[in-house]
């Protein structure tokens, strides 16, 4: 079974802190994604990566950056956390082959910024 | 960013009832996916649809890829308490690596 793990289930940070959210997948997937989930808005794509050291902006990249130094690991960075970044953050991974492009999700990190 | 229109946003039903939800878009999608998210967990894939008109079942779940490629529906028959959660549709545009998600349907079941 595909396994996507996220470093923390719950995180509480203060405004202005630098925050790192880590995601690791064990299926050698090329693609990795970071979403945020807010009530009534569904899942919105922040950034995605289709290869090591490659990244592309999603729909809401402002205030975030990402890092992919190894194929299995994709990090989301909040350079200076703000209260409007309080949310559930979901990581996902998938194969690059469009015919088998199902995304597999981690359990999520619920981030609260005070 | 582009989003799918998913409805209804929430449903409150009695155990044993059938459930129906759908997603529509102004764009043509190459793939439709349906995910379920249990409370406190990440979404899990339920059904994947790859051809227009395709009707696929997974136990009590049935989903269809609309013939126009712009919509999809998910039906759940004879609901049970463990069906509670948020259901998301997702579509993939041709040649795109990323998915577009609906807003979700929150399902609540009264025993």
Image (tube, coloured by chain):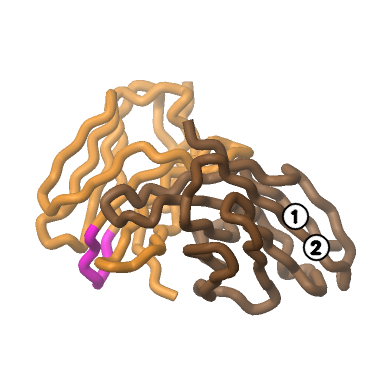
Residue that protrudes farthest toward the bottom in the picture: A62
Any mark on residue A111, and which? Answer: 1
* Number of disc labels: 2
Query: In terms of image quadrants, where is residue B107?
Result: top left
Quadrant, the C terminus of chain A: bottom right
Label 1 crowd (10 A; few <14 / some 14-19 / many >=20) = many
Decide: is B19 above or below A47: above
**Secondary structure of residue under mark 2:** strand
Q: Residue at x 40, y 58 (%)?
A: B102
In the image, the chain rendered in brown is: A
Decide: is A26 above or below A96: above
Q: Which residues are magenta?
A: B24-30
Query: For residue A39: magenta?
Result: no
Q: Residue at x 57, y 68 (%)?
A: A46
Q: Residue at x 64, y 79 (%)?
A: A62
Which of the marked residues, 2 or 1, is nearer the chain's N terminus? 2
Decide: is A49 above or below A30: below
Question: The residue marked by circle 2 belongs to what chain?
Answer: A
State the hue of chain B. orange
Magenta stretch secondary structure, dominant: loop
Question: The residue marked by circle 1 belongs to what chain?
Answer: A
Q: Which residue is labeled 2 in the image?
A: A19
Name the side, left or right, on which A1 lies relative to A5: left
């Amino acid at each position: 079974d595909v396994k996507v793990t996220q470093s923390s289930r719950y995180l509480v940070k203060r405004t202005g802190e630098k925050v790192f959210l880590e995601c690791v997948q064990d299926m050698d997937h090329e693609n990795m994604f970071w979403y945020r989930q807010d009530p009534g808005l569904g899942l919105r794509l922040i950034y995605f990566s289709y290869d090591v050291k490659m990244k592309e902006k999603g729909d809401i990249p402002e205030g975030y950056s990402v890092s992919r130094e190894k194929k299995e690991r994709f990090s989301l960075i909040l350079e200076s956390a703000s209260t409007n970044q309080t949310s559930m953050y979901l990581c996902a991974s998938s194969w690059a082959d469009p015919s088998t492009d199902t995304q597999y999700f981690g359990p999520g990190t619920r981030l609260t910024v005070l | 960013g582009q989003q799918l229109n998913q409805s209804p946003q929430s449903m409150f039903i009695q155990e044993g009832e059938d459930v129906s939800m759908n997603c529509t878009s102004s764009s043509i999608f190459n793939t439709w996916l349906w995910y379920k998210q249990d409370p406190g967990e990440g979404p899990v894939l339920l059904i994947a649809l790859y051809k227009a008109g395709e009707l696929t079942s997974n136990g009590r779940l049935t989903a269809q890829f609309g013939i126009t490629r712009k919509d999809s529906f998910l039906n759940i028959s004879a609901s049970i308490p463990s069906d509670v959660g948020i259901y998301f549709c997702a579509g993939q545009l041709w040649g795109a690596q990323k998915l577009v998600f609906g807003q979700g349907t929150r399902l609540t079941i009264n025993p």
